[in-house]
Image: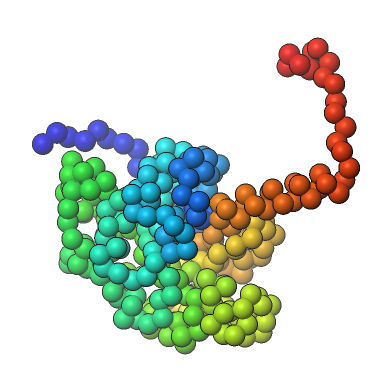
Amino acid sequence: MIAATETVRPAPLRRRLAAGDTLIGSWINSGSPIVAELMAAGGFDFLCVDVEHSAVDLPQTQALFQAIRSGRPECAAIVRLHGVDYAFVKRYLDAGAAGILAPLVRTPEEASLLVQAAKYPPEGSRGVGFCRANSYGMRLADECARANDETLVAVQIEHIDAVRNIDAILAVPGVDAAFIGPYDLTASMGITARFEHPDYLAAQATILAACARHAITPGIHVVTPDVGEVRRRMAEGFRFIGYSLDITMLSTVCVQGLSTLRTGGPARRETPTPSAALA
């Protein structure tokens, strides 16, 4: 068999979180490889392709993973799945995901199914096949040996049932991170988007305390592109943070820019001097 060309391997996302690093990423919902490549080049620690709430399919996801690596190899490409499903978990990992984030995990049984799908035997039941994750078979043995150690498995805590079961969920071997979905969590509590409500704050504190007890990385999605809120979440102890998403950042810049232009009067056009034009 032809040997694969050696490539530079950045430090795995899972290992960086285990070492105590705070990582900031974002979400890809547009399905655009150009946007994914630009965002990776911009310096994010990870980019998460969202296949739960977007129209992005598996072939598009693999293309997005390739674009992310092209933009910046150090930027980890992960995927937010549409649920806990063995067949889909392994296919997205085979496409090259460095980690998986499963939505609406509410029980330890669901967390265990996720880990089983993500890990090769003896730690799980992931099937072995030639795919992008192992250079289409050229690095099969190396990658299978490495995958269990490097693949990030994160559960999304976004239902009050998950908060009630949080210790049992985080006690499942192989779970690396617990990621709060604030909108769905508040919706399940009957207080949609009321992030200062005492019940939501109590649920958040419960999750953070459980993460500390079980040595699990706490994560959260700051949906609006608000740098101040990201800093507040970091101060609260969150270390795996989603900073907005591509479509929201684009719409925010457009709305804010146009609002400023239309309410501030016409901008004065400066005539460049010859030296400025040549600069």
Residue at image position (54%, 59%) is: 242
Would residue 241 appear left or right of 72 to someone viewing this image? Answer: right
**How did the renderer colour the structure?**
rainbow
Quarter location, residue 88: bottom left
Residue 42 horizontal/vertical position (percent): 55, 42
Residue at image position (38%, 49%) is: 60
How many numbered marks appear? 0
Q: Which of the two residues, 4 or 68, is positioned nearer the viewer here?
A: 68
Residue 52 in view in this figure: yes
The image quadrant where one finds the C terminus is top right
Residue at image position (18%, 48%) is: 130
Quarter location, residue 229: bottom right
Residue 102 horizontal/vertical position (percent): 39, 68
Residue 100 horizontal/vertical position (percent): 37, 61
Residue 18 in view in this figure: no
Would residue 242 appear left or right of 213 to someone viewing this image? Answer: right
Would residue 266 appear left or right of 97 to someone viewing this image? Answer: right
Residue at image position (24%, 42%) is: 135
Residue farthest to the left, as pictured:
1
Residue 166 horizontal/vertical position (percent): 44, 82
Quarter location, residue 50: bottom left
The image quadrant where one finds the N terminus is top left
Above-or-below relation of 61 to 192: above
Above-or-below relation of 123 to 3: below
